[in-house]
Amino acid sequence: MDHKQHPLGSGFTAASTAREVLAGIDLSGAHAVVTGGHSGLGLETTRALGEAGASVTVGSRDPDGAAAALAGIEGAEVSRLDLLDPTSIDAFVARYLDSGRPLHILVNNAGLPLGDGPVRDARGYESQFATNHLGHFQLTLGLLPALRAAHGARVVNVSSGGHRLSDIRWDDPHFTTGYDHYLAYGQSKTANVLFAVELDRRWAQDGVRGYAVHPGVVVGTKLNSSVGEEQQRAMGLLDESGRPIVDPDRGLKSPQQGAATIVFAAASPLLAEIGGVYLKDNDISPLDEDPAPLTFGTEQDPPSDVVPHAIDPRSAQRLWEVSEELIKVRAPLA
């Protein structure tokens, strides 16, 4: 497969923080949207972009709680957004477009924690796929006029090495049979990567580039906490005292280190001429062409390099078309 997954040699490491990645980068005058930008990795992303000069609109289902979490971050504001509710997404988009602001950076960060059983939205869609992918897909399509108006914009999809768990279940993406919460999560993270690949192919000519990011394993996020303290300890994420283990060389990161690759995708000049790639550790990930099976819930250090099914251009185009049908919306023409 021809691909672009060739590390740049960025000079950063797995231990680099968001602040270090953005050092010397001036985002004054830039406008950003970060979904779920009030907690976990999203909060660190919002803080880092704000410190670099960007104004940040945070999409949250709980605007009051989000506003409290963002207190003290200059240039941050909150707008209500529920990614499981198409009407809420449309309302968020309308408010942003009515503001007349261009959109330079869109970080599709929000996601659901793992659940014990299948949860479905009002349309009957499986909630991991509906939130992590379809909600962000609808949001991004709606914001395209503002992205184009920036005359140089980036869309960053926060994915995961967990994309290795599952390709798209083309015949049953909503798990009407055979539900497994790890596979549902993995499918949604594969969708995040494929979406970035096809977005970049379609919109690069408009100055809009797409990226997918593996931030690392950050203990304390809703996703990792959802498996429970005992399981986190068994996975080597917590020590015997229940404190997070931070070892970036093993992919175990602090929130500041986890947000680094997100803001690297959002603003690094090293990516000025390339998009449609999957990033990790503040660089482009190599392609793992012979991936070993990945199982969550074990003591192994999970591999996180991108695998072929997540960057296949034919799958990327197919997912885009399927997603348009599922949300009943098509991207606006230029």
Image (spheres, rainbow, N blue to C red):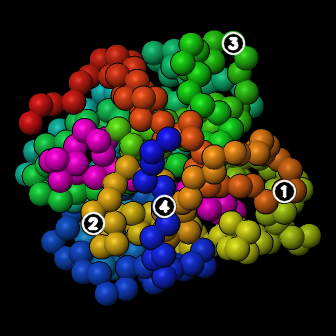
Give the residue displayed 10% in from the left and 45% down from the top: 98
Cα–Cα span, label 2 and label 1: 35 Å
**Is residue 204 on the magenta stretch?**
yes
Q: Which element carries disc 4, helix, strand or loop?
A: loop
Q: Residues within 10 Å of mark 4 (few under 14, many from 20)?
A: some
Q: Is residue 47 visible?
A: no
Q: Does 68 sit above or below residue 208?
A: below
Q: Residues within 10 Å of mark 2 (few under 14, many from 20)?
A: few
Q: Nearer the viewer, mark 4 or mark 3?
A: 4
Q: Please say if the residues under marks 2 and 1 sit with CB atoms less than 8 Å apart.
A: no
Q: Nearer the viewer, mark 2 or mark 3?
A: 2
Q: Amino acid at mark 2?
A: Ala
Residue 159 drawn at (x, y percent): 52, 49
* Residue stretch rendered in magenta on the structure: 199-222
Give the residue displayed 65% in from the left and 55% down from the top: 304
Task: Please give the residue where the numbered disc 1 appears in the rendered image.
Answer: 300
> In the displayed structure, does residue 172 sit left or right of residue 231?
left
Task: Please give the residue where the numbered disc 4 appears in the rendered image.
Answer: 6
Cα–Cα span, label 2 and label 3: 43 Å
Task: Please give the residue where the numbered disc 2 appears in the rendered image.
Answer: 272
> In the displayed structure, does residue 300 sit left or right of residue 88?
right
Looking at the picture, tell me which residue is in the foreground, 179 or 35. 179
Give the residue displayed 37% in from the left and 85% down from the top: 23
Residue at the bottom extreme, as displayed? 24
Q: Nearer the viewer, mark 2 or mark 4?
A: 4
Task: Point out the tag, 1 or 4, that comes first from the N-terminus.
Answer: 4
Q: Please say if the residues under marks 3 and 1 sit with CB atoms less than 8 Å apart.
A: no
Cα–Cα span, label 3 and label 1: 29 Å
Q: Which element carries disc 3, helix, strand or loop?
A: loop
Where residue 252 sits, quadrant-wise, is bottom right
Task: Point out the tag, 4 or 3, that comes first from the N-terminus.
Answer: 4
Task: Please give the residue where the numbered disc 3 appears in the rendered image.
Answer: 177
